[in-house]
Image (cartoon, grey):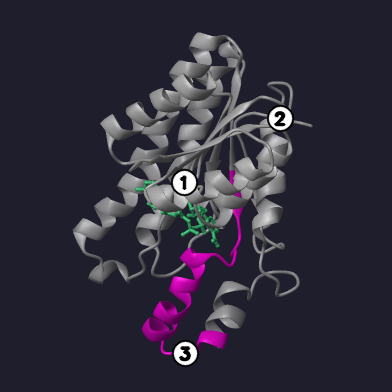
Amino acid sequence: MLLKDKVAYITGAASGIGREIAIVFAREGAKIVVADLNKAAADATAAEIAKGGTQAMGVGVDVTDEAQVDASVKAATDAMGPIDILISNAGIQIVHPVEEFAFSDWKKMLAIHLDGAFLTTRACLKSMYASGRGGSVIYMGSVHSKEASVLKAPYVTAKHGLIGLCKVVAKEGAKHNVRANVICPGFVRTPLVDKQIPEQAKTLGITEAQVIKDVMLKETVDGEFTTTDDVAQVALMFASFPTNALTGQSMVVSHGWFMQ
Ligand code: NAD
């Protein structure tokens, strides 16, 4: 088991990519904190994980709320011990052309993706530094951490920003044996993407099949979606890597959509 008795605090873990990471990490022996805005779904995910014999708890948290984040990390450490792994993954998507973007939607996007990453990082780093056990911070970036697409101004801006935060945490965390890395997936069929397909079809005036083939998967080497398990396996690699040799990095997992 690669993560035996490690405590993993995973945001957005009640759905999609975060949920899959929680399941894969539990299989590797980690204790899981399923942190999500949707408390009922977080509890259900934790209950399902616990059936496999691993300790898991659901916590309801809005990652944009400083007090809620701090309280949820305290509840997690009280129940399970110091945090070893943070997966900052919670996210949403809102698509519009720049000239039509509501300022309130722009601020909401930056709050979830960037304030959420900062607040959870700060709370979990305090626990990692105090325990002296080191740790691994993993941000859910995107191909949009490296590349732009139309209609996604705040998402692309925020996902690029996560790389900056990651590099600072890698530098500051090194002396505490804390590493930080970013995973940059291509399109993964989760509720977040399923919601975008009809929206983009409407905005671009094309069919849903065309959105998938000609927009989402057009630049991949094989026309395939990335899977939640593909992303979870990369998260496992970053979480279990034993030294500071692998820190401050971003890895693209996208069927060759973006090559660096
Ligand atoms: P998802 O919609 O399946 O899951 C997102 C989860 O985040 C949900 O459970 C939701 O309740 C939670 N959440 C939303 N706002 C929150 C908040 N304020 N506080 C706490 N939890 C909140 O989405 P997903 O596709 O699994 O996306 C997860 C991450 O992966 C996101 O950061 C997303 O940008 C990124 N990503 C997704 C794809 C993709 O194609 N699906 C590609 C690249 C990156």
Q: Which residue is mark 3?
A: 206
Identify the residue at horizontal 43%, vertical 43% (top origin): 161
Disc on res. 240: none
| Residue stretch in magenta | 183-209
Q: Are marks 1 and 3 in contact (CB under 8 Å)?
A: no
Q: In the rendering, at what x and y percent does residue 232 appear?
A: 67, 48
Q: Is mark 1 within 8 Å of ligand 1?
A: no
Viewer can see residue 122: no
Q: Amino acid at mark 2?
A: Leu
Query: Is 133 rendered above or below residue 42?
Result: above
Q: Which residue is mark 1?
A: 43
State the separation of the CA atoms marked 1 and 2.
Answer: 22 Å
Q: In the rendering, at what x and y percent does residue 134 appear?
A: 60, 16
Q: Which residue is mark 2?
A: 3
SS at badge 3: loop
Q: Mark 3 or mark 2, which is nearer the start of the sequence?
A: 2
Figure quadrant of the N terminus: top right
SS at badge 1: helix
Q: Amino acid at mark 3?
A: Ile
Mark 2 neighbour class, 10 Å CA radius: few under 14, some 14 to 19, many 20 or more:
some
Q: In the rendering, at what x and y percent does residue 249 appear?
A: 63, 36
